[in-house]
């Protein structure tokens, strides 16, 4: 039995979030301040969770009588990492008060994109490393990632495969495990979850669809269309197959 899942993700703020900040070219020391205030913990957070807190805080301040821009600026103080990303869009901190709310939102979208791209790169590294640890060969799309969205395919000589699509703006990781028989699919997913947890990343399955397609469901077909047909690797009983990695 094979399966497709749609998962939300979180990772350790204390260790992983500074790495995301560094990937974005930001001061890593700005990563963890404000996480608790943003409804997260040092054990679990994400860029989407921090942004959602900012958005909700802005709505609260506006409901309390603040002008739209003032509400956004006040909410921004609770998420230092987002504020730091905003200053990379060509907007000096002292200029923020001179913007219209629409202009602020345009710069904010650019800042979000920078953080989502960094988060996508971080998750891609961790997922790739976890799959290599489990004995998979990794292939990734040559297309430049858009807002951190990435597609990768991991294959084994036995014909089993895991396709993953990362969509940071939605806070999602989709997985399609194919080529497994019986309960082997669930056992392999448990191994993958454990390998990711060792790297500070936790997946929470929100939707699951089990299927009989040994070649994979729609996500695997999308990977075949983008990466080319999956080639079955020959067994090498006397030595481990060479791992070709493109991450």
Image (cartoon, rainbow, N blue to C red):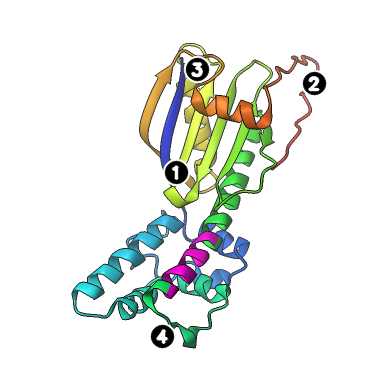
> Which residue was labeled with disc 4?
97
Residue at 60 percent of width and 19 percent of height: 160
Q: Nearer the viewer, mark 2 or mark 3?
A: 3
CA distance separating discs 2 and 3: 24 Å
Q: Is residue 45 visible?
A: no
Taking depth in this image into account, of 225 and 117 the one nearest to the observer is 225
CA distance separating discs 4 and 2: 64 Å
Q: Nearer the viewer, mark 4 or mark 2?
A: 4
Whether label 1 touches label 3, CB < 8 Å: no
**Neighbourhood count class around disc 2 (C-alpha, 10 Å): few under 14, some 14–19, many 20 upward:** few
Taking depth in this image into account, of 74 and 34 the one nearest to the observer is 74
Which of the marked residues, 1 or 3, is nearer the chain's N terminus? 1
Highlighted magenta segment, given as a residue range: 103-113
Is residue 45 positioned above or below 246 on the image? below
Mark number displayed over residue 239? 2
Q: Residue 211's spot in the image, x, y percent? A: 43, 17
Q: Is residue 69 visible?
A: yes
> Which residue was labeled with disc 1?
172
Q: Is residue 83 magenta?
A: no
Is residue 184 positioned above or below 144 on the image? above
Q: Secondary structure at mark 1?
A: strand
**Residue lying furthest left in this view?**
64
Which of the marked residues, 1 or 2, is nearer the chain's N terminus? 1
Q: Secondary structure at mark 4?
A: helix
Whether label 1 touches label 4, CB < 8 Å: no
CA distance separating discs 1 and 3: 24 Å
Residue at 48 percent of width and 88 percent of height: 94
Which of the marked residues, 1 or 4, is nearer the chain's N terminus? 4
Whether label 2 touches label 3, CB < 8 Å: no
Q: Nearer the viewer, mark 1 or mark 3?
A: 1
């Amino acid at each position: 039995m094979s399966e497709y899942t749609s998962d939300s993700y979180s990772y350790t703020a204390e260790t992983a979030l500074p790495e995301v900040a560094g990937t974005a070219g930001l001061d890593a020391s700005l990563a963890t301040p404000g996480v608790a205030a943003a409804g997260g913990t040092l054990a679990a957070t994400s860029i989407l969770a921090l942004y959602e807190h900012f958005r909700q805080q802005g709505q609260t301040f506006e409901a309390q009588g603040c002008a739209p821009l003032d509400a956004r600026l006040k909410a921004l103080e609770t998420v230092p990492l987002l504020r730091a990303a905003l200053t990379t869009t060509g907007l000096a901190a002292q200029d923020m008060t001179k913007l219209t709310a629409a202009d602020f939102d345009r710069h904010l979208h650019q800042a979000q994109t920078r953080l989502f791209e960094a988060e996508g790169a971080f998750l891609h590294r961790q997922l790739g490393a976890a799959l290599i640890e489990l004995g998979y060969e990794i292939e990734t799309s040559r297309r430049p990632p858009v807002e951190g969205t990435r597609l990768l395919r991991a294959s084994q000589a036995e014909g089993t495969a895991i396709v993953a699509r990362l969509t940071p703006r939605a806070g999602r990781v989709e997985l399609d495990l194919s080529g497994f028989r019986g309960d082997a699919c669930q056992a392999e997913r448990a191994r993958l979850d454990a390998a990711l947890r060792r790297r500070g990343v936790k997946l929470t399955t929100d939707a699951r669809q089990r299927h009989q397609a040994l070649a994979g469901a729609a996500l695997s077909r999308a990977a075949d269309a983008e990466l080319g047909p999956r080639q079955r690797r020959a067994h090498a009983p006397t030595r481990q197959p060479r791992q070709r990695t493109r991450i």
